[in-house]
Image (cartoon, rainbow, N blue to C red):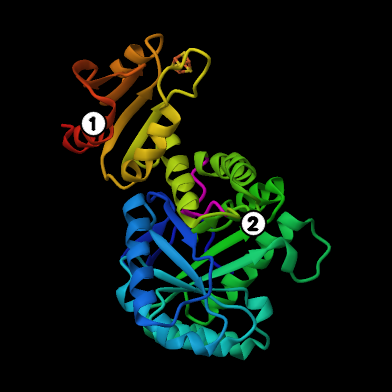
Amino acid sequence: MQAMGVDRQVLIGDRLLGVGLPPLVQTMYDQSLPHSEEALDELVRRIGSLNAMGCDIIRFSYPKSDDRSAFTYLCARSPIPVVADIHFDYKLALEAIECGAHKIRINPGNIGARWKVDEVLASAKDHGTAIRIGLNSGSLPKGNDPPARLMSNTALTYLDWFEQAGFTASVVSLKASDEAVTIEANRLFAAQSGYPLHLGVTEAGSVVSSVVRSTWALGQLLSEGIGSTLRISITGPIETEVQAGVELLRTLGLRKRGIRIVSCPRCGRSSFDSQGFLASVEQDLLSIDRDLTVAIMGCQVNGPGEAKGADIAITGIGNAIFLYQGGELVRKVAPDEARDAFLEAVRNAE
Ligand code: SF4
């Protein structure tokens, strides 16, 4: 039986996961791998942008051997660690490890005979590759326990097996589309094991649905010190997944980097297009690696007050746009200069 409560640290490429370490943000690429060098280079640049937004690890499906050279190319060039998601075929797991995957994600229950998983463990150990045991409530072995307990116990059984094979670079995920089951399964597991947990609510829906459901569930777990990595699974752009994950960690005080945005929601008093202004600067703000609060406000009621609490703020009152630094009004700018003036002030903020 694995040692209860012994906190394990697992290296994924250059990122260390473990109980008590800052949680990391993951996403999963949502298309099949391109094969041309030009398209792969474009994908590497996109991963660079995700990294600038705060993404720490990216996962790819690895469904067929045809992807071998493309995946090898990516593993060698990605600025953040790469994970291969494998189902059913242990040979694909072996291949992904040889391609340079920093971690593979498998469900040992769908790989087949035990010796096949043992071969994967041996190769992963040789290559310094971590393994995530990824269990979803929809694909568990049969059992009479309630789903959360069955998920947690199944993971513990697999970890015992992995330890007997001399493999300890394991991460576990216990995901369900039901948030309560997700929370309970992770709590049960964390009470019995010190292996790092990757958190997520699976198949959580579109942006609003997923962000609400995921942050409600993951927020509780992270507040209890449970969870070493997370993914906010969204049926939508992977950039939004990263943005949501980083924002959750910032809100919980578990990450400092990144810009905290305060913005006017608009009302009948608005005389400035704060929504359009935010849309025009948001992508730039998300890529600025600073611990700052910025405010984008739309009237004289709350604008000056919010500006006082922000490092950089802009308040539009009709065509007059006021720029604040450190709570002090520094200048009035013309509408067509506002975006550049605001971003320059954010980049130069002390
Ligand atoms: S900041 Fe002003 S314009 Fe914006 S919602 Fe508040 S009161 Fe309305």
Q: Looking at the rendering, in which quadrant would you find the N terminus?
A: bottom right
Residue behind mark 1: 337
Q: Which mark is residue 202?
A: 2
Question: Which quadrant of the view contains residue 262?
Answer: top left
Q: Is residue 125 visible?
A: no
Location of residue 210 with respect to 48 vertically, above or below: above
Residue 3 lies in the magenta stretch:
no
Q: Does dot 1 land on a helix, a strand or a loop?
A: helix
Q: CA distance from mark 1 to mark 2?
A: 43 Å
Q: Which mark is residue 346?
A: none
Q: Does dot 2 land on a helix, a strand or a loop?
A: loop
Identified by mark 1, the residue type is Glu
**In the image, is the residue at mark 1 within 8 Å of ligand 1 by its beta carbon?**
no
Identified by mark 2, the residue type is Thr
Identify which residue is drawn at 66% across, 56% down: 203
Question: Which quadrant of the view contains residue 282?
Answer: top left
